[in-house]
Image (cartoon, rainbow, N blue to C red):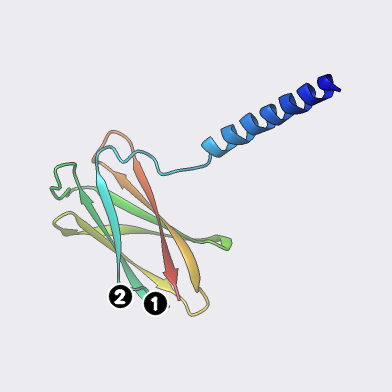
Amino acid sequence: MKWQHITLLSWLLVITVMLASCAATQPADADTGGLVIDLSTQPDPPVAGQVALIITIKNANQQAVDGAEVNLLVSHSSMGTMLLQNEAMSTGNGQYSATFDFSQDSQGDWRVTVEVRNVQPETIRKNFVITIP
């Protein structure tokens, strides 16, 4: 009987360790390399129709970062195949803007992945979620 309890506890320990290791491998935002990347929308809050996604990039000293190449990947949370992509144009002072058309039937959560190039040796990615009511 004691042997069965030890075996059961051992299996529970193995399963717990396996589950913990799976949780640690869930996708997360990559290190932003000391950059502060923020997302805002115009209009705010966003609505169905034309929405400007405005990215602000600052360095660790809170100084605007100009000269970056910024690409936006936007996908609907419940429609994995619905992917929109647009290059954000610099508007100065560390801000970059791209406009997307969120149609009337595109309500819900949208994942926005911001890709920043030409600032660090590697591409920097940061994820956001916006909600279209």
The reply to whether the C-beta atoms of the residues labelled 2 and 1 are less than 8 Å apart is yes
Report which quarter residue 48 is drawn in.
Answer: bottom left
* Percent coordinates x, y for residue 131 in the rendering: 43, 68
At horizontal 37% and vertical 48% (from top left) the residue drawn is: 126
Q: Of all residues shown, which one is farthest toward the right?
A: 1
Badge 1 element: loop
Foreground of the two, 54 or 36: 36
- Does residue 25 appear left or right of residue 10 in this picture? left
| Residue 65 position within the rendered picture, expressed as x and y whole percent measured from the top left | 17, 48
Q: Residue at x 36, y 75 (%)?
A: 50
Q: Which residue is mark 2?
A: 43
| Quadrant in the rendering for residue 53 | bottom left
Q: Would you name the residue on which mark 1 appears?
A: 47
For the residue marked with disc 2, what is the amino acid? Pro
> How dense is the environment of label 2, judged by Cα within 10 Å: few (below 14), some, or many (20 and up)?
few
The numbered mark at residue 27 is none
Position of 40 compared to 131: left or right?
left
Q: Residues within 10 Å of mark 1 (few under 14, many from 20)?
A: some
Residue 95 horizontal/vertical position (percent):
20, 58
In the rendered image of this protein, does residue 48 appear above or below residue 67? below
Q: Residue at x 57, y 32 (%)?
A: 21
Q: Is residue 35 above or below residue 70?
A: above
Relative placement, left or right, of 118 versus 6 is: left
Query: Could you tell me residue 17's position as x and y percent?
Result: 62, 29
Q: Amino acid at mark 1?
A: Val
Viewport quadrant of the N terminus: top right
> What residue is drawn where x is 39% and y is 40%?
30
> In which image quadrant can residue 111 be found?
bottom left
Quadrant occupied by the C terminus: bottom left
Q: Marks 2/1: CA distance?
A: 7 Å
Choose between 7 and 86: the one closer to the eye.
Answer: 7
Q: Classify 120 as above or below 80.
A: above
